[in-house]
Image (spheres, rainbow, N blue to C red):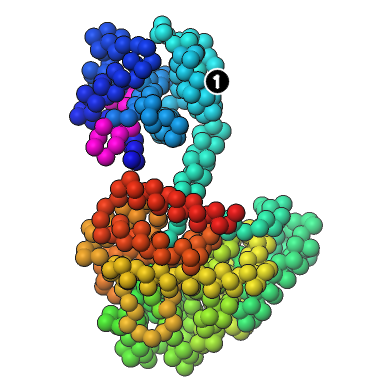
Amino acid sequence: MELVISRYEPYFELGVQSFLGKAFKDDGRKLDLIGKDKDLTTITSHYMNAGGCFWVLKDDKNIVHGTIALRYLGDCFEIRRFFVGRKDQGKGYGKLLLQTVLQYAIDTRVEIVKAATLERSMVAQFLFEQAGFKPAARYNESRADIFYKLALTLEWRYIFQINDLRRQFHETLILNPTENLPCLHKETNASFIDGLYVSERIKDLSDKIIFAGRNPYISFFASIKNSWCQLLHAYDVDLKTLSGLHAHMILFMCILHPKDIVMLLPEICGGHYSTEAILKSIGADVIHMQADCRHMCVDREKTEKLIELYQPKYIFVDRSEGLVYEDFSWLGKYEQSFKIFDASQYLSHILTGDFQNPFAMGFDMILSTLHKNYPGPQKGIICVKKDSETWRTYQQNAKTFISSTHPGDIANSLQPLLEFEQFKEYARNNNGCSRLLEKELVRHGIPVVEPACTDPKTMHTWILCQNSQESYDYYLKLEQLGLLTNYRLLPYGLGYGLRLGTSAAVRCGLNRSHIAELASIMSRTYHGYVDSSTKKRTSKFIRRVKESTA
């Protein structure tokens, strides 16, 4: 039976009194609701409306199995009514109750939390001391023997919250296609160069400022850039930007002039929802590629007519969402337009040759994040097929907007590729898990959206429920289980649904042998509700997946 922590509501009053009456009896005491325990008859006014709070540990029938409270004393909180039923002890519920009140104290910006317990209450003492409480002088006339105080310093708050996030991370599995986990890669020992100012070229007496001792770093980064040029068949590469969207902003701030016409893959076709606003803020005139919603792709004929009519200076294909890796080679004949492709969702499979290189389609520039489909650091990359005025303009102007290259991340950008066979196996496993999961979900009757054209399938899977509320409810049910997906507005007028992917999960250990059980869990949740047995099953499944990376 799964127990959950809930804030007190008036309908819990009798349950709280009954639970604590039994807890007191087991401890050789008697509950006195007229005297020293009368706060339990006015919990709302005594705690909830007086600056504090009260929580219960309950089952799915609202039966109380534990309690904890915070009483506000004017300049601090005091922990009160900290009990877990005997049958539920030793399962981590006491720690969760204590974490709940401490997070509440952090959120309310109270700096001191006090607590008191009996000398024989060894478990409570252990939990308080584990959380950082220190012995303190008696501060009331209760029958407690031991008193504690915890100072919620900046250091304590930071460590507490980081540890809690780490716990949550290990108890969940990311199932979306746009996140990766570079922290799971081997240490590269490049942290010693974090924070250094490293320029892209060796400087001389004509420069306004030079940092001494940087020439070896500049040479090292030139070698990294050369490696990226070879991998992507590029003329030149830039690694200054911090992410894909940051690359969008910096690039267009550098090369656009007011009233320049930019043809953009619009949001309805899976384009990024921020890109048009970025372009218009710089003064561009934006026209859209046309959508073929029936086949869920770009309407080539209508789009070509617009290109011929408006003669755009730039064509930007920034697909952040899509079921297929669409062939845009037909754009190659429009030589008057500088063509840019965002590869953030596809970079690993471009590098392994599973997807066609955008340069081979006729694009002039590729930009990408290095932390989505590619399992690298938080970084952006911009590369060009050949030298051009546009590229020289970007290089000249970019240094105005970026002062630091974040050298540690540049050094780490190649790290996933150092063992290329292992990298290819990651890409293959990602592809295999994604395809197999989609197949299994369909077999279980989950409404997976099927692509309507024959281009290569991407790592994205869409689930489209009957309406947005049903999609959102399914998203929340999966989140309850620790399966973290995306709820989002899907392209081509489909409406709201779920977006799934396996890139981060594969980094955590997911492989093809896990897919049948994962699909079964997702099916049970889709066709039913979240119960304690499904939670336990999912928790064991996630542990098994993550243990496979150990």
Give the crowd class for mark 1: few <14, some 14-19, many >=20 residues within 10 Å. Answer: some
Question: Which quadrant of the view contains residue 377?
Answer: bottom right
- Is residue 53 a member of the stretch shown in magenta? yes
Quarter of the picture containing the C terminus is bottom right
Q: Amino acid at mark 1?
A: Lys
Q: Position of residue 198 (x, y in %)?
A: 70, 60
Q: Where does residue 77 sit, x and y in percent of width and height?
A: 41, 21
Pinpoint residue 116: horizontal percent, then vertical percent.
45, 16
- Would you say residue 77 sits in the magenta stretch? no
- Note whether 369 is above or below 67 in the view shown: below
From this viewpoint, which residue is outermost toward the top? 141
Q: Nearer the viewer, residue 22 or 407?
A: 22
Residue closest to the eye, 150 or 175: 175
Which residue extends farthest bottom? 333
Q: Hey, which quadrant is residue 490 in on the image?
A: bottom left
> Residue at label 1?
134
Q: Nearer the viewer, residue 396 or 19?
A: 19
Q: Is residue 417 among what the camera can see?
A: yes
SS assignment at label 1: strand
Residue 274 position within the rendered picture, expressed as x and y whole percent measured from the top left? 39, 65
Q: Which residues are magenta?
A: 48-63
**In this view, 534 is above or below 453:** above
Task: Identify the residue shown where x is 50% and y is 20%.
Answer: 122
Q: Looking at the picture, does residue 509 appear above or below residue 88?
A: below
Q: Residue at x 61, y 70 (%)?
A: 423
Question: Looking at the figure, which quarter contains the N terminus?
Answer: top left
